Amino acid sequence: MDRVIRITLDKEYCVDIDPLNYTLKQRYKGKTKDGSPREGERTVGYYGNLRQCIEKYMAENQLDDLAGQEMPLVQYVRMIENANKKVMCALEDSLQRIERILERRKEEIWDSRNFTTTNRSGRYGTGGMRIS
């Protein structure tokens, strides 16, 4: 069973979320050796949480947008600040909602695997299972 969630960030980037990590991927178009069109994905990196993944996405996006340009430092800083503000405003709310959903899912999975029930004393237990 494939337990991966895919979040599309834009036409080029996406995040695959599995129980172990968040994988930032970049889609690309190219050609094979014989010249026929080909589409693929490259893994940019693996991250422990979605926030780290989005921060890397922002850095990659900036490099993509500014590749090959020459400009004064002040102009570069302004462009990066504006791009960061725009992306952060768009993603912050969604990021918080996604993190809450994922945390609830982890808790549900944990609870279902531990068979948590209340015992006679009203305390939570493991339904008679002994855990060492």
Image (cartoon, grey):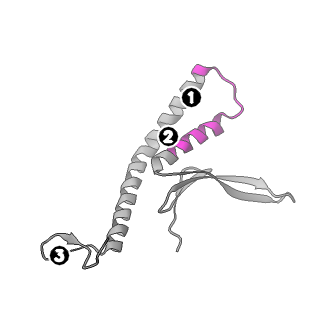
Q: Which residues are magenta?
A: 54-74
Q: Residue at x 46, y 40 (%)?
A: 88
Sequence-wise, the earlier of marks 2 and 1 is: 1
Q: Residue at x 34, y 64 (%)?
A: 107
Asked if 88 appears above or below 38 in the picture, the reply is above
CA gap, disc 1 and disc 3:
60 Å
**Residue 97 percent across, percent down from the top left:** 38, 53
Q: Going by the image, does 53 lie left or right of 76? A: left
Q: Residue type at mark 3: give it.
A: Asn
CA gap, disc 2 and disc 1:
12 Å
Asked if 22 appears above or below 127 in the picture, the reply is above
Tell me which secondary structure the magenta stretch mostly adopts: helix
Q: Which residue is mark 3?
A: 119
Sequence-wise, the earlier of marks 2 and 3 is: 2
Q: Residue type at mark 1: give it.
A: Met
Q: Which residue is mark 1?
A: 79
Q: Residue type at mark 2: give it.
A: Val
Q: Which residue is mark 2?
A: 87
Secondary structure under the numbered disc 2 in the rendered image: helix
Secondary structure under the numbered disc 3 in the rendered image: loop
Q: Quadrant of residue 117?
A: bottom left
